[in-house]
Amino acid sequence: MGNKIKAYAASEPKGKFEPFEFDAGELGDEQVEIKVLWCGICHSDLSMRNNDWQMTEYPFVGGHEAVGEIVAAGANVKGVKVGDKVGLGWNSGSCGHCEQCISGNQIMCRDLEQTIVNRHGSFAEKVRCHWSWAIKLPDEMDISKAGPLFCDGITVFNPLYQYGISPTDKVGVIGIGGLGHLAVQFADKWGCEVTAFSSNPGKTEELKNLGADFVVNSRSDEELEKVKGKFDLILSTVNVTLNWELYLQTLAPKGRLHILGALTEPIPLQTFSIIKQKAVSSTATGSPTVVSKMLEFCARHDVKAVTEIFPMSKINQAFEHLESGKARYRIVLQNDI
């Protein structure tokens, strides 16, 4: 197995992706090499390409929603083998021996390796990771739509799983884009009553088809006033400032406002807004076991991303489409390197 990998890389902030080749070196004993068949594009790839978070190294090979086939495995790989169809998300390695890893919370490992941070990702013919982060796909899953599940999917599934959300709970989802359209589906299939908060009233019928029972204008204080004290959980997927005080008032006692969008401004919080044991929290993606649980849930309940497909050779056009805000709802690249 050769060590040269062809990819697409940006050489500067906001730069175009150009053909790029790099030497991946020897495959580690606990690593697998995945032939990338499909790879989703996430807004995080755009933020990293633009160095919005001040941690990008160039040349930058993005891509952290990879689906493909294992084509090589190190001597100490366990649980997966050459030929397996797997997915790889935001994380590609963890230490395996710290308290967080041993307790099944690998996502909180201090040495967590991130697929597109300080290493090359999946806008490439092949990508590598530790075997524990190469998650096998259910046989019945459509692999062309599976990529976004490894970022957006697990991000919105994780709080439902971690916080023991009940099928009798009332769940709100703010922002119906890549994250939100999957959150509505998950909460609906979980058995919850689902309210979609959207600033686009034209989406109402579409949102109800995805599983929303009610649709509320996310920027209308008047409409928010009508649902005060209702929600056990609100998942916020937006990265813009909203009337957070009013959203906290829409929570029931012991309700939770869970932030999943990458906000850059602080959320104002007053004691009396949360005094009825309300909570404001956040999580990121999920550990391997939770990813596997999510995939099983998706296969059982036919939860899938709504996708638009571009060939990987058209990656720059795909990013332009993402930046336009018109993607419905996730862009997936079909590898043609």
Image: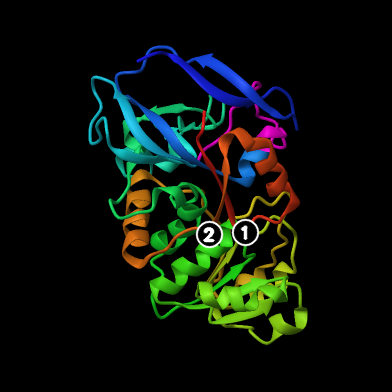
Question: Badges 2 and 1: C-beta atoms under 8 Å apart?
Answer: yes
Residue 26 in sight: yes
Mark 1 surroundings within 10 Å by alpha-carbon count, few (fewer than 14), some (14 through 19), many (20 or more): some
Residue bearing the label numbered 2? 306
Q: Position of residue 164 (x, y in %)?
A: 38, 66
> Is-magenta flag for residue 50?
yes
Above or below residue 3? Residue 130 is below
Q: Amino acid at mark 2?
A: Val
Magenta segment's dominant SS is loop
What residue is drawn where x is 70% and y is 56%?
326
SS at mark 1 in the image: loop
Rendered view: 23 above or below 305? above
Cα separation between marks 2 and 1: 7 Å
Judge from the rendering whether residue 262 lies leftward or rightward of residue 286; answer left or right: right
Q: Secondary structure at mark 2?
A: loop
Q: Residue 63: percent from the left, percent from the top?
A: 54, 36
Q: In the orientation shown, which residue stands out farthest toward the bottom?
A: 226
Where residue 133 sits: x, y (%)?
A: 37, 37
Looking at the picture, the colour scheme in use is rainbow
Q: Residue at x 62, y 60 (%)?
A: 177
Instruction: Classify the position of the N terminus by image quarter.
Output: top left
Q: Quadrant of residue 239?
A: bottom right
What mark, if any, has residue 328 been given in the picture?
1
For the residue pair 327 and 162, the one nearer the viewer reads as 327
- Residue 44 is marked as none
Q: What residue sits 25% from the left and 35% below the top?
A: 80
- Which residues make up the magenta segment? 47-64
Amino acid type indicated by mark 1: Arg
Residue 139 lies in magenta, yes or no? no
Residue 84 in the figure: left or right of residue 204: left
Q: Residues within 10 Å of mark 2 (few under 14, many from 20)?
A: some
197 horizontally vs 168: left or right: right
